[in-house]
Image (cartoon, rainbow, N blue to C red):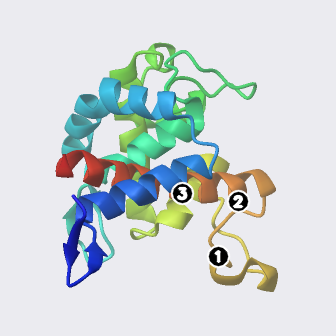
Amino acid sequence: MCRKVTGKRVFSGFEVILLFAVLFILFSNIDTGAVRLIDAEYSGIIEEAVLEYPYISASGDRKIIDPALIKAVIYIESRGKPDAKSGAGAYGLTQIMPQTAKLLGCDYKTLNEPKNAVVCSVKFLAALLTYNKGDLTKTLSGYNGGTYSTETKPTEKEGNLAGKIYENPETKRYVVSVLRMFEFFKDFEKVKKLK
């Protein structure tokens, strides 16, 4: 709780994080119902999958994907709806395309089952993170725009994202959205742990 120290108010770490989380939700268009659903329904599945399918970092170490990243992908891809299907044919919580499912050894027809969708997505993200030497921006670009979508020539107007994001406005928005939700889910976890 807030306490006074020599006439000044001092806030605890929990209060500061909670305040930022509340402000973030208020000033963004985050569907808090979907956030709670994803956290409540899929956390256990995500925890198991990230332990089973690590990626290899640029230094050759085995690394675990942060579960908050998987939650962010689920949020952006389907808002937690297991039966979500795109016009392009992407299916399930994590919107995996048929050819990607086949390549990863996943059964496309069962991607409406949360565990299957999460495992397939974690396998895909682990492969992309390994291929991109841990570069998350390139990995998310590949997840949305295709595995090799980051093999583009940088343009000056892309700034610090030059050469990292497929030259497609939808993919650029996707990467920014997932990164934003990744930070949100990491903060959400911190707040839960402080309670």
Residue located beneath label 3 in the image: 180
Circle 1 sits in a helix, a strand or a loop, which is it? helix
Please say if 93 is above or below 58.
Answer: above
User: Is residue 180 shown above or below 29?
Assistant: below
Marks 1/2: CA distance?
A: 9 Å
Q: Give the side of residue 23 with respect to residue 18, left or right.
A: right
Q: Earlier in the sequence, mark 1 or mark 3?
A: 1
As measured in the structure, the alpha-carbon distance from the residue carrying label 1 to the one carrying label 3 is 15 Å
Q: What amino acid type should be assigned to the residue bearing mark 1? A: Leu
The residue that label 2 is drawn on is 172
Residue that label 1 marks: 161
Q: Amino acid at mark 3?
A: Arg
Task: Verify CB contact (< 8 Å) between mark 1 and mark 3.
Answer: no
Other residues around mark 2 within 10 Å, as few (<14) / some (14–19) / many (≥20)? many
- Can you say whether 183 is above or below 52 in the image? below
Q: Give yes or no for contact between labels 1 and 2 (Cβ–Cβ under 8 Å).
A: yes
Q: Residue at x 20, y 36 (%)?
A: 48
Q: Residue drawn 40% across and 33% down?
A: 120
Q: For mark 1, does the 10 Å Cα neighbourhood hold few (<14), some (14 to 19), or many (20 or more) residues? A: some
Vertical relation: 64 (above or below) 138: above
- Mark nearest the camera among 1 and 3 is 3
Tag 3 or tag 2, which sits nearer the N-term? Answer: 2
Quarter of the rendering occupied by the N terminus: bottom left
For this rendering, which residue is in front, 177 or 14?
Answer: 14
Can residue 75 be seen from the camera position used here?
A: yes
Q: Nearer the viewer, mark 2 or mark 3?
A: 3
